[in-house]
Image (cartoon, helix red, strand yellow):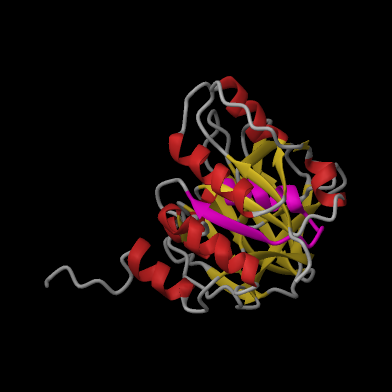
């Protein structure tokens, strides 16, 4: 097997020491001869008084440096950052859970040594996850106009309900009076969309979910559509600015700006060691099917 070139991304509280993250990083650097640390994590470690003798790379260097894999140490938010970092480079992500829920970061931190050993043996699969992207006449997010979980349009803190006009492949779908609207991937179906009443989809479902947030219309429900359809949104409201979010990043959205939303033409790979990880995670993390009467 060819030598693996590993990049490491992670998150810790600024200025604090995270002994578990540091231990995991040491395990990774000991397991592979070619390991680099992403600049954001390196800066956080320096602020916490920790310095590693590893090459430091930025996002451009990660995408163009022929790295075999990105190891993400943290929770699900760290995985979302990692997906944005690898972009369309094709670099898969191994998520080691150093956070709380760990739905996407499915490898428990206590299993790090075993997981790294399986990596060196090539004993893993890569699960491709679809992305959703947005475009408009204004370049809102530059080239990184995609998200792994969802794209959300929502009201600002100073505004009341917004009005969202939605079209599918140019045909009028509905007008939503709500706090916002979520366009979710199957991966994102267990995130924000789920908390707003949306359904759970398996990761390989070729679908998108349109989920209103606190709709004023009682008969409006989430809608599952094929992911080859294009969604067009225009937003109205009393405030001058609304918001559009791609996972954890947001920017102001001017009224009457038309948004074109569709499945991205590339995917992000997540490293998995067991094909049944997804349903195990549903049961263990979201208590799916748990009977509290027992």
Tell me which segment is drawn in magenta. 78-97
Location of the N terminus by quadrant is bottom right
Q: Nearer the viewer, residue 205 or 170?
A: 205
Q: Is residue 222 above or below residue 71?
A: below
Count of numbered tags: 0
Residue 143 shown left or right of residue 83 in the figure: right
Q: Quadrant of the C terminus?
A: bottom left
Image position, residue 160 (x, y; %): 52, 36
Rendered location of residue 111, percent (x, y): 44, 59
Q: Residue at x 77, y 50 (%)?
A: 145
Residue for point 25% across, 71% down: 290
Q: Decide if residue 103 is in sight here.
A: no
* Residue 7 in magenta stretch: no
Q: Residue at x 71, y 51 (%)?
A: 33
Residue 248 seen in this snapshot: yes
Nearer to us in this view, 19 or 2: 2
Q: Tell me residue 183's x, y (percent).
A: 62, 59
Q: Is residue 88 magenta?
A: yes
> Toward the viewer: 97 or 175?
97
Left or right of 231, for residue 280: left
Q: Position of residue 140 (x, y in %)?
A: 79, 41
């Amino acid at each position: 097997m060819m030598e693996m070139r590993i990049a490491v991304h992670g998150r810790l509280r600024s200025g604090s020491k995270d002994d578990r993250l540091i231990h995991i990083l040491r395990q990774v650097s000991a397991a592979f001869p070619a390991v680099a640390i992403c600049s954001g994590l390196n800066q956080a470690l320096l602020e916490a008084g920790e310095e590693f003798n590893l090459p430091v790379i930025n996002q451009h260097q990660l995408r163009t440096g022929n790295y075999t894999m990105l190891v993400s140490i943290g929770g699900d938010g760290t995985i979302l950052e990692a997906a944005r970092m690898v972009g369309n480079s094709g670099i898969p992500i191994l998520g080691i859970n150093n956070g709380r829920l760990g739905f996407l970061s499915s490898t428990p931190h206590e299993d790090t040594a075993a997981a790294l050993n399986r990596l060196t043996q090539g004993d893993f699969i890569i699960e491709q996850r679809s992305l959703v992207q947005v475009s408009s006449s204004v370049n809102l997010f530059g080239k990184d106009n995609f998200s792994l979980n969802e794209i959300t349009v929502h009201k600002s803190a100073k505004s009341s309900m917004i009005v969202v006009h939605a079209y599918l492949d140019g045909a009028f779908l509905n007008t939503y009076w709500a706090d916002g609207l979520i366009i979710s991937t199957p991966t994102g179906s267990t995130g924000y969309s789920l908390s707003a009443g949306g359904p759970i989809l398996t990761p390989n479902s070729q679908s998108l979910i349109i989920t209103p947030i606190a709709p004023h219309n009682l008969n409006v429900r989430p809608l599952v559509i094929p992911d080859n359809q294009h969604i067009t949104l225009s937003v109205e409201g009393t405030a001058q600015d609304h918001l559009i979010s791609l996972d954890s990043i947001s920017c102001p959205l001017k009224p009457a700006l038309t948004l074109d939303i569709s499945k991205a033409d590339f995917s992000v790979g997540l490293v998995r060691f067991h094909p049944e990880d997804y349903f195990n995670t549903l049961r263990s993390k979201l208590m799916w099917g748990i009977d509290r009467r027992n």
